[in-house]
Image (cartoon, grey):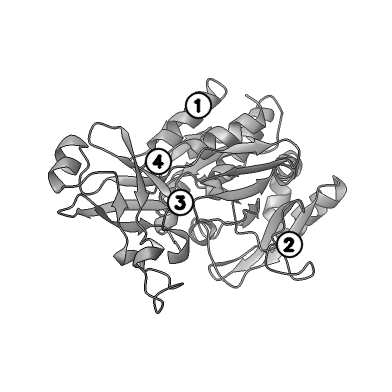
Amino acid sequence: MNSIELIKRFSDVNGVSGFEDEVAQLAKEIIGNDYPVCEDKIRNLYINNIEKEKRTKPVVMLDAHSDEVGFMVQSIEPNGLLKFIALGGWSNQQIPAHKVRVLNRDGEYVEGIISSIPPHFTSKADAGKVTDMKDMFIDVGTTSYEETVNDFKIGVGAPVVPDVICTYNEKSRMFLGKAFDDRVGCAVIVDVMKELKDKELDVTLTGVLSTQEEEGCRGAVVATQKVMPDVAIVLEGPPADDNFRGAYRSQGALRKGAQVRHIDPTMIANPRLVRFIQKIAMENNIKIQETVRESGGTNASKIHLENGGIPTIVIGIPVRYTHSHYGFISYDDYIETVKLVKAIAENITKDIIDSF
């Protein structure tokens, strides 16, 4: 499977927070017999994790979260509409009038649409106002509670995912799809580990597709305690900013390469690790862009505090319109990120890690 198909398949698969099973299954199918894989009870997927007492080399953990933002059914109205809550962070203005898929009790996805009020019934005073999510509903095309529950077999607690199919434009080399935060990181891990399978490294690479990042980075806590890495690289799909900031202020631009994060409110990157990555990028002519974030957070927030403090870095592929139904990413940024992570793995040693 080439990288383009890999990205598309990871984007298309369903997996909101707490319901990441399809993502793990896809990753296992792609990894095949290249590495041993296992899962834990929070549904983290581990690729090539070696028990601590059997290790002969330092461990570099590649982490990407497998969940995507979505919704969950909270209750069902007498007219069959679904009241819902958010899984992950959403802006109210991005939610209405989009298609979704609701998982029913038979394990089948039912098409629906997030309700919006037609302009014919909107007063001039309310025109242009953004509806609060608590006043929105999901409509699956039923007209009664009984039809929704008995015929469509939808119940309270059902996960809801955006109904989007990923496409790739060969001319622009852009993907348009859902869940790039953070399925693009999952794809990077699989690509890197498959490409380095027969490479003799001075470290052991362990890949983790961690769960429930969008609901508090929960899977990463469990995963880090299990893997106990010496260094962690968190692969992310961070928000792009080049569509609303000028060239000199933008630090998450499409086609500008892998994004290396110095800081966000939840973690300051290990500066010695940052300098090592800058050096690797320069020596290998890999395009990177550096960011100082005033908001946001990733699994790195939990990982870097475990095991006495783990040198951790966030490397991202910028996503336009992340945390919405649709997003754009650049294939060129993906390629630069894969090159960067491979170069780090090929050049890092125990002595270098000790210097961090």
- C-alpha distance separating marks 3 and 4: 14 Å
Residues marked 3 and 4 touching at CB (< 8 Å): no
- Residue 98, given in percent of the width and then of the height, sits at 43, 51
Between 280 and 124, the residue placed more toward the observer is 124
Are the residues tagged 3 and 1 within 8 Å (C-beta)? no
Where is the C terminus found, in terms of image quarters?
Answer: bottom right
Nearest to N terminus: mark 4 or mark 2: 4
Label ID, residue 220: 3
Q: Looking at the image, do the residues carrying marks 2 and 1 touch, with CB atoms under 8 Å apart?
A: no
The residue that disc 4 covers is 20
How much space separates mark 2 and mark 1, taking CA atoms?
A: 34 Å
Count neighbours of disc 2 (C-alpha within 10 A) and say few if under 14, some if 14 to 19, many if 20 or more.
some
Residue at mark 4 to residue at mark 2: CA–CA distance: 30 Å
Q: Nearer the viewer, mark 2 or mark 1?
A: 2
Identify which amino acid the numbered label 4 is placed on. Glu
Q: Position of residue 243 (x, y in %)?
A: 68, 62
138 or 50: nearer the viewer = 138
Residue labelled with disc 2: 290
